[in-house]
Amino acid sequence: MEKNFFTNRRFFVTGFLVFFCLGFIIFFSGNETLSLAFQEAVVGVAFFLVIPTLYCTMILKESLKNIGWHWGELREGIFAGVVSLVVASFLFVVATFLFPEIKEAYALPLFVQKNFLWFVLYEMILVPFTIFLYEMFFRGFVQLLWLRQNGLWGVGVGVSLFFLTMFLQDSITWSLFALFLFCPFSAWIAHRSGSIRYSFFTQWLFLLLADVFLLILQ
Amino acid sequence: MSIFLKKQNFFFSLFLMSALLIEPMAPVLAFKMPSASSMAGDIEKRYHLDLGAIQNQGEEFNTSGNKKMTPEVSLFFNPTDPKEGQKITAKALPIYFSNNENDLYYTWYLKRVDCDKETCDYDDNGKYDEEDWKIEAMRILAQNGYDSSDTNYGSDDDNDGYKARFGGNNKVGHVDHCYFHDNVSGKNYEFAESTGSPEFPCPSGTSAACMLPEEEITSGSNDPSENFFTITSSTTCQFAGFPVCSSETSTASCSTGTPRCVADPSTTACGTALSSCTPQAESNSKPYCKHIFPEASKSGDGVFGKTEERFWGTNPHDPDTADNGNKDEANVIGLGQSSFTWNYVSGDKVGVAVEGTSMFPTKHDDGSNMIMWAFSKNNCSISEASGTGAYTKTIRGYKVSIPTVDIDMNKCLKNNLIDPAEGGQPSNLDVSVTATPESPTNDPTESAAGDTVVAYANISNVGRNATEVLYEWNVSISDNIRFDATSGGNVANITKELQNWGLLGNSKGNGLNTIELRLNIPQNSKRTAEFGTSEKKLGDFLSGGVGYLRFRVDAVENFSSGVVRKGKSDVIVKFLSTGEKINTYRVRTITETVRGITVGLDQSSDSICNDLSDRAVCSIIKNDIIGVKVDTGGLSDFQWAINGKPLVCSKVVSSECADEKQTNVNFFPVTGNVGDTYTVSVTANDSQSGKNITMARTFRIVEPSVYIRSTNNNVAWPKLLGQYKDITGSSGSSGKCANNLCDHFSETVFEAYAGSDLSFKRGFVPAYIESMSTSEWRLNGERVDGSTDPQTITFSADRSLGDIYSLDFVSRVIQSDDIRRALFAIWNVSPFDTAEKNMSIATQIELRDPAITYATPLGPEKYFAALTSYFPASILFTFRIFVSVGLILFICGLLYGLLERRRGETQ
C-alpha cells in the first residue's frame, strides 16, 4: 500500500491540487471594496488556468499536450463534436419548450441584447474566455491530466466535480442550463479526442446558438 | 373696484352710442343745433367723465383680445439646493387650463450633462436630442424605481394601454382644434399643415381694406313737397376693417363697406375697386393636432405591447408598474404627472411641456376650446414655425379668417430647460465669519503681550464634509472701518507679513475654518518695515492708536463632477495698538475705620492671566473680585466700562480709586454664571498724541477644576485611545494629525513601565486659584503625606506587570472671609453664594511590560507600508492571489519531490 502510494504520487499530488483549487474557488467570498467580477476573473485565471499550466510544466515537467492543449485525434474530435452539437441542440430545443423556466430565467445583459456590437464582443470574448477556463480545468487538468488512465470513469468524475462545484457555489440555476447540458458532451468530446480544443470550440458554438435561439424566442 | 369699472364701461357705451347717432348729423349746422362735440362735452360734464380716461379705456379695448391669459406652467424644485445623487423633485404648477390638473399631459424631459449620442441615444436616431431627453425622464416616471433587469418580456398580459385624447384626459367627444399662442403679438394660431393665406390682387403699394364711402348732407328749402335734406355722394371714404375672401365664390367681401385696394387705410382716399381674390379654404389648410409625447408615434395609441414594455422598462405583467394609479402607457405620456423625481447629477437640466385645453373658445361653430401647450419657461417663439398663414371659413353666415401656423413644438423644448441649481437657488456657499475678542489690543513692543484674535468661518449650507472645503484667509489692515483707500485712507493686505513675523499660521488649506492672529504687530519693525506694497508702517494704519483688521475668507467646495461652489465673507475687528494694556490682579481687602472694608490690588503677587492661553480671554471663577489696572504713563482721564456699561470705582470700593474721577485702577465682582464673559474696556487720553485710546480685556467665567499631568512622558504617558478625524482642520497636516487623523490620548489613564519611578504634577484651571486652595494627593485611596513639593507626587511603580495604580488629587477652593465680606459689603453678594468649591481628579496608571512596546514603523517597514498604501486595491488583490498560487505550487513541488525520494527509498 505504502509502495503503491509513493508510486502513484502523481495521482495523489494532482488530486490534492485539484481539490485545493476547487475548495478555494468554492469558499472564496470576495472583498466588498473591489468589483466581484474582477475578483472572480482573477481567481478563475489563477486557479483554473495558471495553476494547471504551471503544475504540468514546472512540477510534473510534462508537456501541455497532457492537459489537452494539442489537436489530438482530429477525426474523433470532429465526429464527437458534430454529434454532440446536434444532439445537445436538439435536447436544448426540446427542453426549452418542456421547461418554460429556461426561457424565463435566461438573461443576457441588457446592453448585449440591445446592441449588436456588444453582443458580438460578448460572444467572441467573454463567453470563450469563461469556457476556456472551465475546459482547461475540468477537462484538461482533471479529466486528461489527473484521470486520463481511468477512461470513462474520469469523464464521470470530471463532470461530477463540475456539478458539485456549481452546486456548492449555489450556481445550479435555469439560467445556466445550456452550460450544464453540454458539460457531459464536452467531457465526452475531450475523452474521444484527447484534446480540449474540440470540446472548447463545440461548446462555444453550442452556447452561441443557444443564445441566438433564446433571443429569437423572446 | 369692479363696480367702478362697470360704471365706467356704462358711461363709455353711452358716450359711443351718442356719438354714433349724432355724428352723421354733424354737417347739418345750418340751424341752431348743438354739435356732437358740444353734446359729448355736456355728457362728460354731467356724468363727471374724464375724456382721457375714456380714451384710455377705448385704447385698451382695442387690444384686449391679444392680452388673454394663456396657459402657463411654473416649475418648483425641492430641495432647492440639490446635492449630487440626492433625490430631487420638480413640481409643475400649470395655470389657465380649463382641465383639472390630473387630466393634463405632462411631458417631462431630462437632459443629462454626461450624455451624448454614443451613450444616451435611446431612439437610435444617431443624435442625443429632445426625444432622448423625453425618454430619459418618462422612463424614470414609468418605472418609478422598478428594476427590469430580471423581467421576462416574452409575453405581455397586463392590458395597460392608454389612448390619449387631445386637450386632456377629460376631453371626451370634443372637436380637436390645436393652437399656438404667440406671446409677442398675442395672436392665437391654429395648427395647420398648409400655411397659405387668401390673396387679394391689389396693385403694388396698396393693400386690401374695407372702405365705407362718406355721404354729404346739405339743407334744402323749407318746402314741404321736397326733402329738407339733400344727400349726395362724397369722394372720401372711411376705413371699416379688412375684407375676407370667400372660398366658395372667390370674391372679396366686407361686413361693412366695400373691398378696395388702398395705399393707406388711415386716410380718406377710397382707392381702387377690388372684387376677386384667391381663397384659402379650411380643407386646403388641413388643420391638425399632434401630441409631443416621447416616441409619439406609438405612445398614447392605446396599445402597449411587450416591445414597448421592454423599451420603457415597465413590468409587462403589472398594469401599473409605477404604482401611482395610472396604466403604464398613461405614465409614459405623463397623464396627471405633475411631479417628477429623479437622482440629481450636477449639470442636469429638466423641463416639462403640459398639454391641455385652454380657456379660450375657438371661433369654430362647435363646443371647442383651444388645445394648447405650456412650457416650463413659457418660452416658445413663433420664429420656430415653418410658416404662418390663414384660412377663411364661413361661420354662422359670416366669413371668418383664422390664422394658422405649422410648427413642431419639440423645437421649443430646448429653450425651456431649467437647471435646478440656477436662478434664485443658493448655489453659493453661505459663509459667515466671527472673531473674538471684540476689542483686542495689539502690543507693538518687544514684550509681545498682545491679544490673540481668533477668526472663525462658518458655512451653513456646506454639501461635503467640512474638512473638504478649501479656505483661504486674507488679513488686511486699515485706519478706517470702511477700508476705503480712495478717500485718502490706508489699506493693505498684510497676510504674508504677519506670517513672516510668525504671528499668523497657515492661511490656506482644507478645513482651515479657524485662524489665530497674535496681535504683536511691531510699531517700527526691525524685521520687516513695509506693509503690503506700500512703504508704510503700523502707525500709518492707526488713527489715535486705533486700527482695523479685516479677516476675509474665501471658501471653495469642489465636487467630483467639476462643479465648484464658492462663498466669501469677512469680519472687521477694531483693535488698539498700545504698549499699555489692562493688567489683571487678584485683590486684597483693607479694613478702614471710616469706610469699613474696601479692596485693593494684590500686588504682592504677579498679575494673573499672563499665559499665552489667557491672553485672548482671561479665565476667572464665579464670586471672585478682579482688579484691573493700566499704567498711567502719559495717560489721563480714564473711563471704565464693563460690557458696554460704565464701571465706576469710588472710594467706597477702594482707596486706590477716587470719588471725583476715575483712576487707572478698577474692580469688578464676578457674579455671572459659568460661560458668561465680561469685556472690560478703558478709554484714556494720551497726553503725547492728544488722542483718546481705548484698551479692552475679555474675561470668561469657568468652572474651577484640577488636572494631573506626567512630568515625564517617556516614563508615564497618556494612554492612546485611538484616532479621530479632525474636522476643523486646525490641527495641521503634520505630526500627530497627519492626514487629519489625530491621536486621541486619555486625560485620566496613563501607562508606565513596571519598576520605573513615576512623577506627576497637578494644575488648576484657572491657574491663579492655586493660592486659594487646600489640596491633597491620594495614591490607591490613601492620603499621601509629607510630600516636599505639593505640586508633584513621585512614587516607584514596584507593583507587578498588569497592575493598576489609582492616583487622585482632591482640592478645595474657598474665598477668604475678608473677600466674602467685601463682596457682601460693597456689591451685596450674599455670603451663601460664596461657599467653597470642591474639585478632584482621579487617574489610573497601568503598568506594562517594557519588552512589549508598540512603535511606529521605521526604515524599510515604513517605506514599504507607505508604498503599499499607494497601490490600487485591485493590484494588491491580484498580487495576493498569485502569491497564493506560487505558494501552493511550491508546496506541491515540495510534496512531489519528497514523495519521489521516499519512493526511491522504498524501492
Image (cartoon, rainbow, N blue to C red):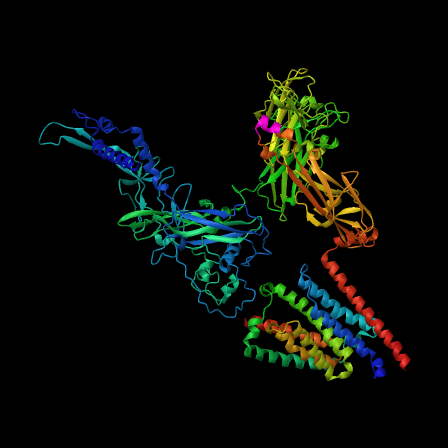
Total of numbered circles in the picture? 0
Q: Answer yes or no: is residue B548 visible.
A: no
Left or right side of B51 for B221: left
Q: What stretch is highlighted in magenta?
A: B821-828
The quadrant of the rendering that contains the C terminus of chain A is bottom right
**Residue furthest to the front:** B593
Q: In which quarter of the image is residue A76?
A: bottom right
Magenta-span inclusion, residue B647: no
- Relative image position of residue A124 (x, y in whole percent): 67, 68
Of B52 and B759, nearer the camera is B759
Which residue is painted at 26% across and 50% down in the image?
B396
Q: In which quarter of the image is the N terminus of chain A?
A: bottom right
Nearest the viewer among B30 and B903 is B903
Q: Main secondary structure of the magenta part?
A: helix
Q: In this view, does B14 lie to the left or right of B380?
A: left
Does B900 sit above or below residue B341? Answer: below
